[in-house]
Amino acid sequence: MPNDSARSPTLLFNADELPRIRRTLQRPEFTRFRASLSEADRAADTRFLREEIKLNDPAQDLGRACNILSRCACLHLLDECEADAELARLALDRILAYKRWDWILEGGTDTVGIMRNGMTIVAVTLALDWLGDRIGAGQRAAVDDYILREAGPAAQRGVFGMTHHDQVKGWTMDPDGIGFHRVDVSRWPVIFDRINLRIIATSGLAAAGAFLHGRHPAAAQWAEEAQASLRLFASREQPDATFPEGVSYWSFTYTYYIVSLEFLRRNCGQDDRGVLDFPAMARYVQCATVLARGKTPDCINVSDANACAGPEALSWIGRHFRDTTANYLVGLPGVVAEHPNSMWAAIWYDETVPARRAADTALDRIMHPGVIVSRSGWELADAVLSFRTGGPENHEHADRNSLLFFLNGERLINDPLKANYSPTDPKWLLRLPDAHSAVLIDGQGHVYHHGEEGTNASTARAVLQDYRTGRDWMLAVSDATDAYRRAGLPATSVQRTVVYLKPDIIIVLDRVRLTEARPVQVRFQVHNDDGHGTATTIADGFAITRPQATLQAGVTGLPAGTVRIDRLPLPAEGGVYPFAEIASPAATAHEILTFCTAAPAGTAHGRLAAQRTPDGWRVTGEHRGRQVALTLVTATDIPIITL
């Protein structure tokens, strides 16, 4: 067993907490993480560090070197092994060999620590804290020197620039760096001010301040500036604790926000645990999480946030607020993953807090910046509908008025996962309207950008015109006209009405008005990442099939042959992305009614029918025991709906 009496850890925990942490790591939730530590290919890591690492690649290779260092430090806490210590020292040497730990420059010369720099300071300082005497005086002095001379000032420069935009001397990308996509970063001080990367830069300041606390006069100033940045970020958060960039970016951001809080609380006398409503954040994560059939939960993935929250921030919330929902979410299968930061979850997890989902969390909610979520319940067999309205946000996709629907652990109406960040990559297409379950006008969607400044916000906006909920239903009307006009399309109205009869009936009315005759298409995307999603035409509609659930859709009021099955024009080796498309012929006014039923695999669908009325539509029928009698009056600007 390790010798805990040697140089003891202090930054995130004390030596007397190690037995608890080691016990936590033996819990079944941490099985994947333990395996990632014990099964790491040390020979491959050694070869990478000695022969393959590129010291001008701070985006990819520096990140891998930090992961190796962090993993070795984790293993040291579990069972001291000289081979791991030796590999850690090699990783540290290579990390210190980098000229800079980031790829943004100010004035063409000085590093701005807003991307990799903060995470690297955190990884290096924690590794030294955990490895203790296995890191000698020479390497420790080299780390102190690097942080004081380069990494700490870079973090300070990044936070200052995001806070004082008018005093920035100009940000550019390092011309000598590789491993990243080059974009125009001149406006990044303004853009990054309010997004997740403010916290990544701040974490570097907090780690540097805590690590050098009492050993160098710069440490106190860095700690104060880190606290001020954290408080500024907190002051701008949503009152309902939702996170505009999506749930996986909440996890990334608050993992580093919380580690910054802990650095400052434990080492610098700054306790800001009460600055935000962290238990409300756990309920937000619960709302954005969808139970799925697979290794990990799924999520409401509007934007680039395409994974469920990780365990680190949730474990801390569970411990410090005795929050049962946070511990419930940590315990979902696969939430604790292989990344070395999962060690922070082991440090913070409190097994005395029950793992129990909050019973009072609403089934219907609107998450900022305009993501409607409506559920039938919280179990695997239940259904979840998401409808995207609202404004632009960092990491967004071109998805206004788009739908996402889950039933029985399956995605039946899809929003594609893992769109690429680079506009030169074919999978940039997954960000665009063509790849969403939404409306196209003559094959074109609403406004978006071309990645000139990265994956930042566009100018697309939709307006929620009506929203109501009942015990077993939800209806919403969203208008995205402005977003389509900004794309140069002759639109006077692009409106979508969604009526959700829980758990498994969805009625979608798309109304498009144009100043010149154009065809209109309505797409429904199919989840096929595993090769098991299909779409087929059926009488007067289409069907989407997944292994554990099916969806059938009827379309009315259009000529025959208006439903077709196709796939996105992407290289097949990167995946096949099918969709069903409803096409309305060229006209200045379009009214397309799609009525969908969903059911678990092997379960029969009922039958719905739609008829025109003098002032709109009437939908009647039955599905899985529910009688439907719905009218939509479309003679008004906003449809009048009677259930």
Image: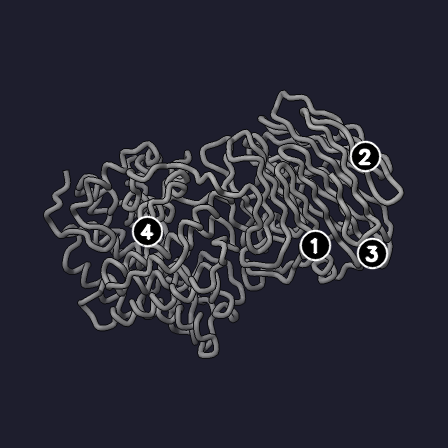
CA–CA distance in space, label 4 to label 1:
50 Å
**Upstream in the sequence, badge 4 or badge 3?**
4
Which residue appears at 63% of the width and 35% of the height?
502
- Which-is-in-front pick, marks 3 and 2? 2
Q: Position of residue 92 (x, y in %)?
A: 26, 54
**Upstream in the sequence, badge 3 or badge 2?**
3
CA–CA distance in space, label 2 to label 1:
24 Å
Q: Secondary structure at mark 4?
A: helix
Pointer 4 residue: 65
- Is 200 or 423 nearer to us in this picture? 200
Pointer 2 residue: 610
Q: Quadrant of the C terminus?
A: top right
Give, as a three-letter code, the residue at label 2. Ala
Which circle marks residue 465 in the picture? 1
> Residue 337: in sight, yes or no?
no
- Which-is-in-front pick, marks 3 and 1? 1
Give, as a three-letter code, the residue at label 4. Ala
Q: Is residue 221 left or right of residue 198?
A: left
Label 1 crowding class (10 Å Cα cut-off): few <14, some 14-19, many 20+?
Answer: some
Pointer 3 residue: 514
- Is 114 or 491 nearer to us in this picture? 491
**Upstream in the sequence, badge 4 or badge 2?**
4
